[in-house]
Amino acid sequence: MPIDVSQFRGMFFEEARDYVAAFEQAVLQLEKDPSDKASVQEMFRAAHSLKGCSSTLGVNDVAAFTHVLENLLDHMRERSVAVSAELIELLLASSDMLGDLLQRAREGQEPPPGMEPLVHKLAAHVRVQDDAPAEVSHGEDQGTLRGDGRMALEIRCEPNLLTEGLDPLPLLRELYEVAEVESLEADVSRVPDLDALEPERCYLAWSGVVDLEDGPEAVREIFEFVEDTCHVTLAPIEAKAPAASSADETAEALIQKSAGLDRTAGEKATLRVATERIDEMINLVGELVIAQASLAQTAGGLEADEAIAESIERMGRRLRELQQCALSVRTIPLSTVFFRFPRLVRDLAAELGKQVQLEVVGGETELDKGVIEGLAGPLTHLVRNAMDHGLETPEAREAAGKPATGSIQLAARQEHGSVVIELSDDGRGLDTQRILEKARAAGLVGPNETVGSDRLHAMIFEPGFSTAASVSDVSGRGVGMDAARSAIEDLSGTLHVRSEPGRGTTVCVTLPLTLAILDGFALMVGRQTYVVPLLSVLEVVKPAREDFSTVLDRGELVSVRGDVMRLVRMRDVLGHPPALDDAEGLIVVVEVQGERFGLLVDDLEGQTNVVIKGLDESVKTSPAILGGSIQGDGSIAFILDLAGVVRVHLALRRTPALATPESESPSGI
Amino acid sequence: MSDPDSVPTTAPASETSQYLTFALKDVTYALPVEAVKEIRGYTDVTPVPGAADYVLGVMNLRGQVIPVMDLRARFGIETKARDRFTVIVLIQLATRVVGAVVDAVADVLDIASDAIGPVPELGETIDQSYLAGMATIDDDVVLTLCVDAIVGSEGLADAASAA
């Protein structure tokens, strides 16, 4: 049965991406510390693995390119090559090329035109190093040599080995312990035909290549006591290697060895599983949790005996553990998205003529894979923005009495049920005066309205809002920040800005741990239960009649402890008949796109965890509805999209206002 | 299907398929049995804010949230109060299940493929795009339905914009 390799292709591209990421990280590490041989080793390992699996799967462009790259890297680890800026550029270009090649291979496209020139450059670099007065002589070196203690090993046994009471197998095992055996083959050419074979005679011999860090003595020792019956010859393969460099070589071999050891120690057994299967499992576990809740409810209603209630309770605890465990399968560390920023910051700093020091903290914090994948875009926007607008030029910084090199910190941590990512810079901070002028000009703020700095800071995320004096390639078009905010909100996250003039800006992104299960807050509108993301809910209050007011150009408002915000009648938004008395309801204060709204609802059910079920495509719903979920009693609750709720609210307000423009004014203040 | 006379010569005469028939007002419709997942008595559904008017709501089918549509409303026939004959036919599609409320299920019939002819112009009644063909069984007219047209999102988008 032929093996269908196509099923491995998807996996290959996943893995390949990891290798390219590891490669790039190692290049950046080498740039920081040119004497770091481990990073060269890391690059080599990544290129080598990539070459191996790409040629197996017939991804030939990648295989061909990594081959050339591997040659250069091999050169770099064989000798002490000076790490020049040019070399780093070349390696980074190679990293980009690999990413590009993989992308194209995945889409079945031809390699990009830039590949050939880059291949020539890489090859040329190898030649330049060859021509340079190398510290190590290289004779017939074709870049194929590996470690430096490599020796050809030959073991020939006397026919009487077995009758002497010896067994070659334990000897060979011992050999594997003291030496790194690259290859070892049994020579069976002397084994006679079966009728001539004498079972007590040994006809075998072995030959192969071993790598001996500790010199040939260790091997000789093994065979010492069988000298008479076992003849061992060891011949250095690189006969011309000068003795003078052996110390260096041994050192390097040791570094290689330790790097290798670290790797095996740090590597845990892993399994790549299709995400759909994991999602299905999480979904089922979620259902199980709900089924248990429903069972508990039923048992409670039956006033079942205590033993039953207790075991149902115990089952619930186990199920929640199982759910945590299942969810953790989907989580991956944030470093998988953070890793790109050192490179981005480095390239941008050069482009913008700024000096920047990036510090990344908390890359080990884990988040749902879906969230992490959606984070790359918005975080990149935020980092670009901080680089472009936040940080000043070295001259401006020095003039302001700050160090010429600006600093950006990207820090992640887990907090309660969510993950907080903070991006801080020590730049000039937000210019609230300018933002206010812009906001007035754009009509976001009334001419005489006073606005708190929090709201002003949040305005940088308004669509089309940019205070940048000049539009650069990097940012300043005012499209990035609102896109970043809506991308974060799509992940059920929130965004906050803190800023101090002259001291810097911090953007704080709060995200739920997982997308599969929503940490929600259940509320009642009419007789229906709706769920909003818990992260968005700030507080719930019982309003008094005098808290409601209507202002001509802003519509209905509600005051919550003196904080005045727009009132959203949820019954109207969701198409339920209006309630008789507003003061009978409750106000749920939520934050949507940086603004607070007071949602008027009928009742609360409290905190809940729900599994989000998409609604069928044939149900064209209101934009206020994100999906459905099944509750403990089997009934269906709808999950609300708060941005959609606000959209529906605004649309509703506009329509009646147009129809009866007069009717609203009498109720105005 | 445009040339019914040619059908007997190309299709084997004995090829029959099973159809579930049900009533809407006074017309009998038929769905291929492969498309029918199950039939359940009518239970209340949860209305969905903002959904098209023929979508009655959603129901919990063993942990899945599935939509339920009123087939009368879908076909533009005046709706009627539910009674003890009202059922929900769960229609199985490639990846999803959709419920359809009908007046009553009638029967499971074997219909030979050559007995199904094209749908004549019916004039005022229902949108022809939902109909696959017409057969006459024991003097009764049975209209076979095109499942994808009923639950497909394209048709729904039109209906929603018209609503």
Image (cartoon, grey):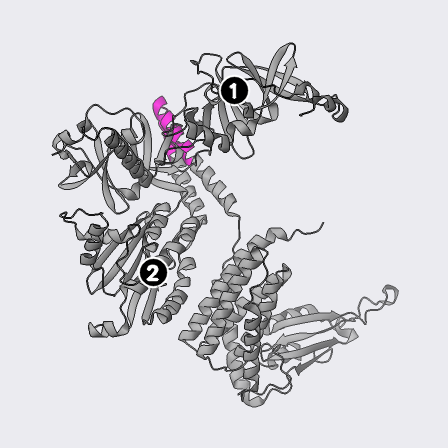
| Label 1 neighbour load within 10 Å: few <14, some 14-19, many 20+ | some
Q: Residue lying at the far right in this picture: please name it.
A: A195
Q: Residue at x 20, y 65 (%)?
A: A502
Q: Is B8 on the left or on the right of A439, as rendered?
A: right
- In the picture, the quarter occupied by the C terminus of chain A is top left
**Which chain letter goes with mark 1?**
B
> Which picture quadrant has residue B106?
top right
Q: Is residue A650 magenta?
A: no
For disc 2, the marked residue is: A475
Q: Quadrant of residue A429?
A: bottom left
Q: Depth check: A656 or A611 in front?
A: A656
Chain bearing tag 2 is A
For badge 1, the amino acid type reads Ile
Locate residue B28, reporting x and y percent.
57, 15
Tell me the residue at 23%/74% (across/down). A398
Secondary structure mostly seen in the magenta stretch? helix
Corner quadrant of residue A655: top left
Position of residue B104 relative to residue B158, above or below, is above
Which mark, residue B126? 1
Question: How far is the residue under mark 1 from the one under mark 2?
Answer: 56 Å
Residue A648 on image: x %, y %: 31, 35
Q: Secondary structure at mark 1?
A: loop
Question: Which of these two is toward me, A124 or A202?
Answer: A124
The amino acid at mark 2 is Ser
| Residue at position x 55%, y 90% in the image | A244
Mark yes or no: residue B2 visible: yes
Q: Which residues are magenta?
A: A289-313
